[in-house]
Image (cartoon, rainbow, N blue to C red):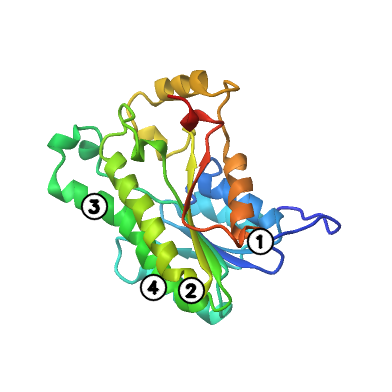
Amino acid sequence: MVAIDSEAKVPLDGKKGLIVGIANEHSIAFGCAEAFRRAGAELAITYLNAKAEPFVRPLAERLASPIVAPCDVREPGQLEAVFARIRNDWGRLDFLLHSIAYAPREDLHSRITDCSQAGFNTAMDVSCHSFIRMARLAEPLMTDGGCLLTVTFYGSEKVVAEYNLMGPVKAALESTVRYLAAELGPKRVRVHALSPGPLKTRAASGIDRFDELLERTRARTPEHQLVGIADVGNVATFLASDAAAALTGNIEYIDAGFHILA
């Protein structure tokens, strides 16, 4: 369990959040979950399937999560079941983190010119449309406003070698963030995309020559350093808190300044 200093300011005290996308302790989603919990939030945690559960459940126990449930957005009814559990157990939701992305390996490693229609549709469904589905399910639970967070990457706006199909998919996700922010703003539901620099995660391991990308990124940042999942978690915690009430629709770069250099 993550210890909470009772004398420290806890910006998410009393808030309830859903975390979708933890694969292991190196996941961006877990870095965010640790920060959320440290800030006082109570968390619902999902795992992809039975194969992933042994890796995720111990992390959920460390976070003292009262709701731990399977969630493969490709399986009919699983996402809806997670939100039904939240509605029954909590009656509300204050924030959520969508940190999932997927493209079939053969399409991810090919030129965009050569990617299949089926592969493109799968990547868009899992990586982008699932966020729209979560927003729709979360909306009635965010009666006092809330925050929706997703995860993107700089390859959405500039061509990054080997990122391939995920570039246009993440570009669609970022546009979705802006439209959701506009539509849900009247209900005080804020929407953001977190854009970390390259991180060594399980998802990133599917990108060809990823170690080279890490070193190129390190060399180009102003302080010649990479970010970690804890850095992402700190920014996510601020955005989910009431202190960020005036912010919505943003792409929040957490990349040690990589994106500012030509």
Residue matched to label 1: 64
Q: Residues within 10 Å of mark 3 (few under 14, many from 20)?
A: some
Q: Amino acid at mark 3?
A: Thr
- Of the numbered discs in the image, which one, if any, rests on residue 80? 4
Where residue 93 sits in the image (x, y, percent)? 55, 72
Where residue 159 sits in the image (x, y, percent)? 31, 31
Residue matched to label 3: 122
Structural distance between the alpha carbons of marks 2 and 3? 32 Å
Residue matched to label 2: 186
Q: Amino acid at mark 2?
A: Pro
Q: Nearer the viewer, mark 2 or mark 3?
A: 2
Structural distance between the alpha carbons of marks 2 and 1? 33 Å
Where residue 1 sits in the image (x, y, percent)? 70, 55
User: Which type of secondary structure does the marked residue at label 1 adopt?
Assistant: loop
Q: Amino acid at mark 4?
A: Glu
The reply to whether callout 2 and callout 1 are in contact (CB within 8 Å) is no
